Image: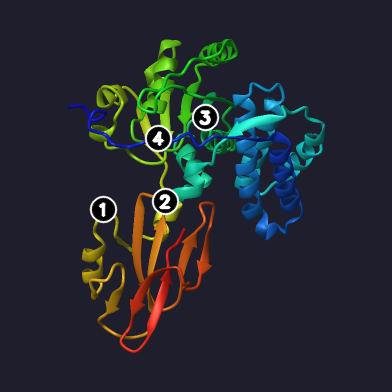
């Protein structure tokens, strides 16, 4: 049986209809905080504004709004600010937002990579930098939704190295295991222009996910449009196991493309932690000198001494275990912050005291 036939995953539609004016108000608030922030905090506030701008740009592109290019320019400017700290373009563009004629309702969905998988936009800046030499024309294509923000970061990175860069976004459609990308006439004209310049094409998104079909559909659509495979690279958030991808004939199709994985900055923070996913909780506890007491996630600290056991969960893919004497980190999907032991999570029993340790969200 095929991977699809034996797969028991159920997908839900996470898209919601929301007021575009509400999204714009939230973006305005984020921009004000950014423009009023002291220089040491520019990156922190810029990150929030960038994610909101990418969300609204993606929603307007899905709605085929005529003002989507204005939001794309702002997203690009915020990506540049995230990298450089320079606010001049953001200041110039912010004033024109109030004059935009927006559709009343747009559809949007949570940026899952930022919200659940500890993905950081600057991971993709690092990936773009590895493709920077020599400077050349570059055509960047983001896969909506989250690929909107990520593609802006890649584009800003390459512009900073002297490359001429243009960016668009696309929305594959169809079943999650069999996405299809259909370029509009505007997209086709843009692709032809990039081909005439012998541009390098970059397709940017988080993932690949369970099937890899979003990446595959965009890559194959570009090849059908005449883009040489040698000039095409896919940039995602992790290296896939080709044998587990659920798209039809995924392994063979995937090998037709160059792929670059963005190295996770968040992962590097936990290099000295113990992985406890995939049922390896008990094993990790034993390695660290702990033993489970048979009552759920409670554990006994066998070696004594100061400190507490920190259990950190970020996303659905990873759980890490940390023994420390001071503090751990909870990740909110956009940035990590120090967090004291809370009251919602595993109960840890020390020789003379009882401590609760919070599960990171």
Q: Relative to the observer, which residue lies in front, 77 or 321?
A: 321
The residue beneath circle 3 is 142
Q: Relative to the observer, which residue lies in front, 85 or 49?
A: 49
Mark 3 or 2: the one toward you: 2
Q: Is mark 2 on a helix, strand or loop?
A: loop
Q: Is there CB contact under 8 Å for labels 2 and 1? A: no
* Residue 102 image-quadrant placement: top right
In the displayed structure, 325 sits above or below 119; it is below
Q: Distance of mark 1 from mark 3, alpha carbons?
A: 31 Å
In the displayed structure, 7 sits above or below 88; it is above
In the displayed structure, 194 sits above or below 234; it is above
Q: Distance of mark 4 from mark 3, alpha carbons?
A: 22 Å
Q: Is there CB contact under 8 Å for labels 1 and 3? A: no
Residue 136 visible, this orientation: no
Rendering coords of residue 62 (x, y %): 59, 25
Q: Is there CB contact under 8 Å for labels 4 and 3? A: no
The residue beneath circle 2 is 315
Marker disc for residue 278: 1
Q: Is there CB contact under 8 Å for labels 4 and 1? A: no
Q: How crowded is mark 3: few (under 14 residues within 10 Å), some or many (20 or more)?
A: many
Q: Distance of mark 2 from mark 1, alpha carbons?
A: 13 Å
The residue beneath circle 4 is 11
Residue, x 80% and y 34% (percent of image)?
96
Q: Relative to the observer, which residue lies in front, 50 or 202?
A: 50
Q: Distance of mark 3 from mark 2, alpha carbons?
A: 22 Å
Mark 4 or 2: the one toward you: 4
């Amino acid at each position: 049986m095929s991977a699809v036939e034996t797969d028991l995953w159920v997908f839900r539609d996470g898209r919601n209809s929301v007021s575009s004016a509400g999204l714009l108000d939230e973006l305005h608030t984020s921009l004000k905080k950014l423009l009023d922030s002291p220089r040491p905090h520019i990156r922190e506030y810029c990150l929030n504004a960038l994610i909101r701008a990418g969300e609204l740009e993606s929603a307007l592109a899905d709605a085929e709004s005529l003002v989507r290019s204005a939001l794309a320019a702002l997203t690009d400017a915020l990506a540049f600010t995230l990298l450089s700290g320079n606010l001049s373009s953001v200041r110039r563009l912010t004033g024109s937002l109030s004059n935009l004629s927006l559709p009343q309702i747009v559809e949007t969905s949570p940026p899952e990579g930022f919200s659940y998988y500890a993905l950081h936009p600057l991971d993709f800046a690092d990936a773009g930098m590895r493709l920077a030499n020599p400077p050349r024309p570059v055509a960047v294509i983001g896969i909506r939704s989250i690929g909107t923000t990520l593609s802006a970061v890649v584009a800003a990175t390459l512009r900073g190295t002297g490359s001429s860069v243009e960016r668009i976004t696309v929305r594959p459609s169809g079943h999650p295991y069999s996405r299809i990308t259909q370029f509009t006439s505007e997209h086709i004209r843009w692709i032809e222009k990039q081909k005439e310049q012998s541009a390098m094409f970059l397709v940017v998104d988080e993932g690949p996910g369970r099937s890899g079909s979003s990446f595959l559909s965009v890559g194959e659509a570009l090849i059908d449009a005449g883009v040489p495979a040698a000039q095409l690279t896919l940039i995602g958030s992790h290296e896939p196991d080709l044998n587990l991808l659920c798209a039809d004939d995924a392994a063979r199709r995937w090998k037709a493309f160059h792929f670059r994985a963005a190295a996770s900055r968040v992962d590097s923070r936990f290099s000295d932690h113990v992985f406890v996913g995939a049922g390896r909780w008990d094993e990790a506890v034993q390695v660290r000198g702990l033993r489970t007491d048979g009552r759920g996630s409670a554990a006994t600290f066998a070696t004594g001494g100061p400190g507490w056991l920190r259990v950190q969960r970020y996303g659905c893919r990873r759980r890490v275990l940390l023994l420390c004497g001071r503090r751990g980190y909870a990740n909110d999907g956009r940035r990590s912050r120090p967090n004291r032991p809370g009251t919602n999570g595993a109960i840890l029993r020390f020789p003379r005291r009882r401590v609760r340790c919070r599960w990171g969200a």
